[in-house]
Image (spheres, rainbow, N blue to C red):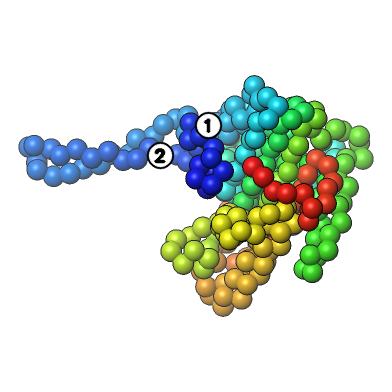
Amino acid sequence: MLINRFKFPESSILMLTGYHISHSDLSPTRGSIFSEEEIDPYRIPTKHNIRMAMFWLVQGCQPGDSLVFHYSGHGSQQRNYTGDEIDGFDETLCPLDFETQGMIVDNEINATIVRPLPTGVKLHAIIDACHSGTVLDLPYLCRMDRSGRYAWEDHRPRTGTWKGTTGGEAISFSGCDDDQTSADTAALSKVTSTGAMTFAFIQAIEKGQGNTYGSILNAMRSTIRKTDGDLAAGGGVVTTLLTMLLTGGSAGGLSQEPQLSANEPFDVYAKPFSL
């Protein structure tokens, strides 16, 4: 979508997915084809590599630049003891090696890709993970009801810690609220298991429902609500084992509501969406 619809150069996109394409070799002695997995150590989503990729994203950005940070994976929460979080929890991303290296906390994400943004630079984050509502620690959360009415909640820390940008713009679409989980399911694409939020976001853009931020958010929520009944009836929800272990959750329907947060409040139905 970034390349075809929004004309991002392919060379400007860094993906951490883990594996190169397997290569095959026809052995003249055996007459058979065998393949061998090749792993690029810099493309594995470890904590170190994700950190380096976030630094890479914002390094040297100039006015007029458009940055996109997309994360599809595991998310969690951990107790916050500094008073920065309204609900008392930090939101986290879980890299491949989180069991040994630890999780990436929202404070670090904010400090790395939000606060350095200079005037004239915009960042869009698409975060498809459990407990991801405020995972960029942005100062304002758009609280929207099912009729589409909304109000911006002030999430600026009582401690006075600055969570905004250095003049740039940061907007995040996330898969669910901080106390919810995000699912993978085959019920949306009908072909393969996908992150429900990522699929709903792309579908909103492709169907021409991406004129404003409000129209995208409503379209995403509508897609997921329509699918919820099928999932609850056994349509293919996959509640991650990791989330169940970390939060005590259980499998069920797709009870997630995509969220929108930003460094500054704006009229979600008047502001045009653009990458």
Q: Residues within 10 Å of mark 2 (few under 14, many from 20)?
A: few
- Which residue, given by chain and number where applicable, does mark 1 sit on? 12
Task: Please name the residue shown 64% across and 47% down the image.
Answer: 126
**Residue 127 screen position, x and y as percent:** 64, 48
Quarter assignment of residue 259: bottom right
In primary-sequence order, the first of circles 1 and 2 is: 1
Task: Please name the residue shown 48% across and 60% down the image.
Answer: 193
Residue 26: mark in rendering: none
User: Relative to residue 224, is residue 232 depicted above or below?
Assistant: below
Numbered disc 1: secondary structure:
helix
Task: Please name the residue shown 68% across and 30% down the image.
Answer: 64
Q: Total label count?
A: 2
Q: Amino acid at mark 1?
A: Ser
- Which residue, given by chain and number where applicable, does mark 2 sit on? 19
In-image side of 25 versus 228 (left or right): left
User: Relative to residue 195, is residue 45 depicted above or below?
Assistant: above
